């Protein structure tokens, strides 16, 4: 099947980056085909945090109110709990925003909502269960993709192809764009547990530190999403100690999990996530652009990846809507996107890397009860510091604002 195209855009990947970009372009009447490999948005390894800057963008699109109805918790503070210390790293309630908090919204619900809004736009077409396999290249220019659906190959031709296909981007690989990888010293054991309603466990999202251990807890109202952080390569040793020993470790960090832990009986309920971060050397080639995790693989630290994906989409729409409407996309337009977004990405990845080294890695290496570094403990006593950290996580170096609605 051949879809005829002229000023068409083909976006690969319906994560936050691809979904938001589809909406922004289709709202301007630009024809968009969005390909998504999965049949739905129910994906396991996704975070839930939407920061003020993204909520402000959604508000400008009149989506903030319905999106916040999907929200099951609002985090006001990011806290680090050591054995004898609890510090507030960032206080979002101090932000001058209509949304002075971090909204916890399951990505499945968030993306399902956005796809419903996108489906209302006449120039938008969503193709699920469609896995992009090849780039279509003519005269050294990417002109679309070949994708597999229902056992057959199809083609979408486009004047701009956007790789928004996440951390393991096949589009990046097919385009032979190199990812400069950095490997944080940690892996994460990722698993869910049912959560009973108990006032003591409300709003328990945060990080807990023990002796050489760390647990990230996401309170998803009726369930816990838990990330037990370990030194890279130490999963085998943990498994050899057995499930009861793992329960003991978890209970030391979070005694309130006692009732829920009866549902964790087998290692097959856990996934081991190798945390990798990195940046693509070039985000573009003639006719092709990478955004979101495809262009910069984000660490889960600080829960900012979704927000940077959304901000990429806004920058692309701001820079490329004009050229797309004129049917004249140049390589320099694509270069302008990388130029605009790369400093913000470099900045936040540096902040994440410092946090990984200073806090997480030193906590995991230490054989003693971990407490946050003295300087951090001192600084965290000042509300100015808590506000600055909240601003940094919520807005980063250079937040994007919509030019087109
Ligand atoms: C364990 C973990 C926890 C995290 N927690 C948080 C958090 O709490 N908050 C936060 O902000 N960030 C978090 N992040 C980071 C965040 O999930 C990512 O930064 C964000 O999802 C990137 O969005 P994206 O749209 O670029 O890519 P993705 O969300 O990865 O979406 C890519 C999409 O492309 C599709 N796709 C892939 N290949 C193809 C193909 N060939 N054809 C068609 N479709 C394809 C995929 O199915 C997927 O739907 C976490 C990451 C990890 C690993």
Image (cartoon, helix red, strand yellow):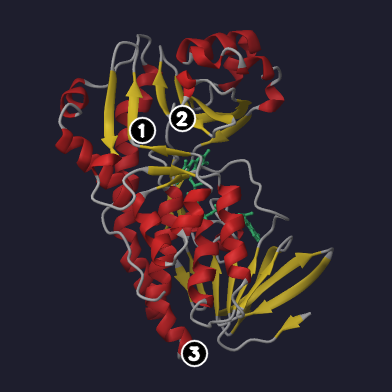
**In front of the other: label 3 or label 1?**
3
Q: Which mark is residue 186?
A: 2
- Which residue is located at x 50 percent, y 77 percent? 27
Query: Regarding mark 1 in the picture, which secondary structure is present there?
Result: helix
First reached walking from the N terminus: tag 1 or tag 2: 2
Of marks 2 and 3, the one in the foreground = 3
User: Residue 215, image x and y in percent?
Assistant: 47, 23
C-alpha separation, residue under disc 1 versus residue under disc 2: 9 Å
Determine the image quadrant of residue 121.
Answer: bottom right
Q: Are marks 1 and 2 in contact (CB under 8 Å)?
A: yes
Residue designated by label 3: 327
At which x and y percent is residue 199? 48, 21
Per the image, label 3 sits on a secondary structure element best described as loop
Q: Secondary structure at mark 2?
A: strand
Q: Classify residue 345 by image quadrant.
A: bottom left
Decide: marks 2, 3 in contact (CB < 8 A)? Answer: no
Pick whichever, 196 or 386, lies toward us: 196
Mark 3 or mark 1, earlier in chain: 3
Q: Give how far across and how far down residue 42 sits, in percent.
A: 66, 47
Instruction: Of the two numbered discs 2 and 3 on the same chain, state the one appearing first in sequence.
Output: 2
Find residue 182 and name its label: none
| Location of the N terminus (image quadrant) | bottom right
Do labels 3 and 1 touch, CB within 8 Å? Answer: no
Quarter containing the C terminus: bottom left
Mark drawn on residue 356: 1
User: Real-space Cα distance between discs 2 and 3?
Assistant: 46 Å
43 vs 142, nearest the viewer: 43
């Amino acid at each position: 099947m051949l879809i005829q195209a002229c000023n068409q855009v083909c976006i690969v990947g319906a994560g936050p980056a691809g979904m938001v970009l589809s909406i922004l372009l289709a709202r301007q009447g630009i024809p968009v085909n969005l390909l998504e490999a999965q049949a739905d948005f129910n994906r396991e390894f996704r975070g839930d945090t939407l920061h003020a800057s993204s909520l402000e963008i959604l508000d400008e699109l009149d989506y903030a109110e319905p999106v916040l109805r999907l929200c099951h918790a609002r985090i006001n503070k990011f806290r680090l709990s050591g054995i004898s210390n609890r510090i507030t790293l960032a206080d979002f309630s101090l932000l001058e925003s209509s949304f002075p908090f971090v909204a916890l919204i399951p990505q499945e619900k968030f993306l399902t909502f956005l796809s419903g809004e996108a489906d209302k736009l006449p120039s938008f077409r969503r193709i699920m269960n469609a896995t992009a396999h090849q780039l279509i290249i003519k005269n050294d220019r990417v002109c679309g993709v070949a994708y597999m659906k229902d056992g057959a190959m199809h083609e979408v031709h486009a004047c701009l192809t956007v790789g928004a296909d996440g951390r393991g981007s096949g589009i990046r690989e097919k385009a032979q764009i190199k990812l400069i990888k950095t490997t944080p010293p940690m892996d994460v054991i990722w698993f869910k547990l049912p959560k009973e309603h108990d006032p003591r466990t409300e709003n328990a999202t945060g990080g807990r530190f023990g002796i050489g251990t760390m647990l990230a807890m996401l309170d998803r109202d009726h369930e816990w999403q838990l990330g037990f952080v370990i030194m890279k390569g130490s999963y085998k040793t943990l498994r050899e100690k057995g499930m009861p020993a793992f329960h003991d470790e978890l209970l030391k960090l979070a005694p309130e999990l006692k009732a829920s832990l009866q549902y964790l009986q087998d290692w097959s309920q856990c996934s081991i996530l190798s945390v990798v971060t990195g940046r693509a050397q070039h985000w573009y080639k003639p006719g092709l652009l990478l955004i979101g995790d495809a262009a910069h693989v984000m660490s889960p630290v600080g829960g900012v990846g979704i927000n940077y994906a959304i901000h990429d989409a806004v920058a692309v729409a701001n820079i490329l809507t004009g050229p797309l409407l004129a049917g004249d996309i140049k390589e320099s337009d694509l270069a302008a996107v990388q130029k605009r977004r790369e400093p913000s990405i470099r900045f936040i990845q540096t902040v994440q890397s410092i946090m990984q080294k200073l806090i997480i890695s030193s906590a995991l290496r230490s054989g003693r009860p971990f407490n946050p570094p003295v300087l951090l403990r001192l600084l965290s006593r000042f509300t100015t510091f808590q506000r600055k950290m909240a601003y940094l996580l919520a807005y980063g170096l250079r937040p994007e604002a919509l030019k087109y609605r």
